[in-house]
Image (spheres, rainbow, N blue to C red):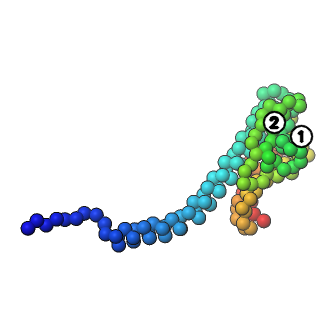
Amino acid sequence: MNIQIHRGFTIIELMIAVSLLGVMLTIAVPSFSSVLKQNRLASQTNSILSSLNYARGQTINQNQNVIVQPITAGTNWSGGWKVRVNGTDIQFFEGITNASLASSAATITYQSDGSLSAVGNITLTLTPNDCPTGDNDVRVITITLSGQSSSATAVCT
C-alpha cells in the first residue's frame, strides 16, 4: 500500500488567512493615508523653504533686491510663485496641490544683504484641504526680518 502525503493548505486555512489579511488591511489603510498626507505636507513645506532660500541666496549673489511673489496678484500663493530681480522673472515654482497657501504679505522682498524689507516678520500658512479641527496639519512658515525662514506646525481650525 502506497500512502501519499498531500502538501498544501486546506480551503478553511486559506479562508482564515484571507480574512485575517482583510482585517489587518482595514486597520493599516487609514494609518497609511495619514502618513501619506504628512509626507505630502512636509514635501510642500520643504519646497517653499527651498524657494525662499534660493531667493535669499540670489540677493547675495547679485547684490540686488529680490522679490518673491505669487504668480496671481494677492496673498493667495496656491497657484505658484516666482522670483524676480529688477522686474525680470528668474525662477518659477509650481503651485500647491490639495492645500491652500496664504501669506501675510503680497510680496516678499529680500534686500541685497539677505534681510527682509518688511516692517515685521512674514508668515506663509499651508493648510491642507482635508484639515479636521484639532489636527496638527497646518504648516506655518515664518520669515524673520533677518531673512531666515523656519517652519512649525499649527492646529487646524
The amino acid type found where label 1 is placed reads: Ser
The C terminus lies in which quarter of the figure? Answer: bottom right
Would you place residue 3 above or below residue 144 in this image? below
The image's mark for residue 83 is 2
Furthest residue toward top: 62
Q: Residue at x 77, y 37 (%)?
A: 92
- 110 to 11, vertically: above or below: above
Q: Of helix, strand and loop, which one carries label 2?
A: strand
Helix or strand or loop: what does disc 1 sit on? Answer: loop
Label 1: which residue? 117
Residue at the image position 31 percent from the left and 66 percent from the top: 9
Q: Residue 112 is drawn in which quadrant?
A: top right
Q: Residue at x 60, y 57 (%)?
A: 35
Q: Position of residue 143 (x, y in %)?
A: 80, 46
Q: Along the horizontal axis of the image, is 69 left or right of 136?
A: right
| Identity, as a three-letter code, of the amino acid under mark 2 | Val
